[in-house]
Image: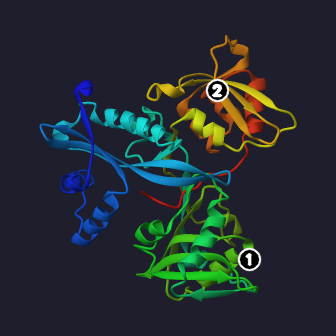
Amino acid sequence: MQDEMEIQKLTVNDFEPAMALSEYAFQVVMSDEQKEKRRTQFSSQDIWGVYEDGQLGAKLHIIPFQTYIHGRSFEMGGIAGVATWPEYRRKGWVAGLLKHALEEMNRNKQSISFLHPFSFGFYRKYGWETYVEFKRYKVPTAHLSSKKATPGTIRRGDPDLSVLKEVYSAYAERYNGTLVRDDARWENSVLVNGTSQRAVYYDEADVAQGYLLYEVKENKFTIKEIIYLNEEARQGLWTFIANHDSMIQEVTLQAPASDTLAFQLDNPRIQQEIVPYFMARIVSVEQFISQYPFASQDSPVQIVLQVEDTHAPWNEGVWQLNVAMNGTASIWKTSETITDDQTIKVDIQALTAVLMGYRRPTEMARIGRIYGPEVAIKALEQAIPERETYLLDFF
């Protein structure tokens, strides 16, 4: 059982059994080329496995990332590749691996963690919570916006990576929960399937203000990424897409949940779907909140948080949160007696959803996900800046 689990860190020597487990669990067959690519990435990840009688029975990857939150970069542990052979299931091994991963991420100062769940309910049990959704569109060619002349130009082809990086970073900083992408991320994960066609919008001053990564195949225009920094770039890119009208029957893409594409079309009756996507979890309340840029205040704010977190006991307890006028936070555990009429009671999932910007404190109080006096919840509401969550990547 769980107390007898033997958790070991995997090395490159464990690559073959780890890949065999991944292929089985995720029902994929990797080509030799894909396996070699995975092998090179293997050593850069923190991979933990449970062994029984010398056999790998379950595993979990922690991928080191950074994520933007209110324009600031946070160290983030990406949980991926969680898998168990069927004969070893129902033994509590994944629960043990997740608890171990939280300890590792806490030690490595990765104060927040993301994952893509096979089941939202399963990971909620361990403290993760939905933090982002996206809007998926299917736009028939007849519904595309009328073409608009813009002062800039579109250049199709193979742009320099530095151009894409600059536009992406400026865009990603506007959201919470987007990834900070290094060159390896671009080359190994972004500029791969579905991005053989690339186009960049440049303004009159020849500065890149937007780009498209896409494919045109079988009468479909499939957008992997459409990024624009202003309305001019948006119109320029959509005019470029509309110029394919003789070749295509529909355009598919995803966008932030608040996106206004349908409203901006002459005929907004297009297919739209809201898709819950990734989950997040605060690993360390103290580390995360100490780095968190709160909104500027007219006067310093004091809030008491009673945090429930059964899987990361270092977060459990009563915290005194002080937010200075410039938005800088200090937080510490308090053993003083605090009365209920001063305290916000919150579990780690709700605290994560609120601080990521996915849900607002007053809304969470209304639906019974956080509890506390109205004055304290309003103070927390005013202290958390408003910013939408979004994520373009997958891992």
Q: Quadrant of residue 139?
A: bottom right
Residue plotted at (56% across, 82% down): 199
Q: Residue at x 73, y 71 (%)?
A: 230
Task: Mark 2 or mark 1: name the one nearer the start of the chain.
Answer: 1
Horizontal side of 7 relative to 220 (left or right) equals left
Q: Secondary structure at mark 2?
A: strand
* Residue bearing the label numbered 1: 232
Q: Is residue 309 visible?
A: no
Q: Is residue 347 left or right of residue 295?
A: left
In this view, which residue lies farthest toward the left?
A: 53
Of the 4 image quadrants, the one containing the C terminus is: bottom left
Which residue corresponds to mark 2? 332
54, 23: nearer the viewer: 54
Kind of residue sitting beneath label 2: Trp
Residue 228, position in %: x, y?
66, 71
Where is residue 185 shown, x and y percent of the image?
Answer: 46, 65
Q: Is residue 264 left or right of residue 286?
A: right
Q: CA distance from mark 2 to mark 1?
A: 47 Å
Q: Amino acid at mark 1?
A: Glu
Q: Which circle, 2 or 1, is nearer the viewer? A: 2
How many discs appear?
2
Quarter of the picture containing the N terminus is: top left
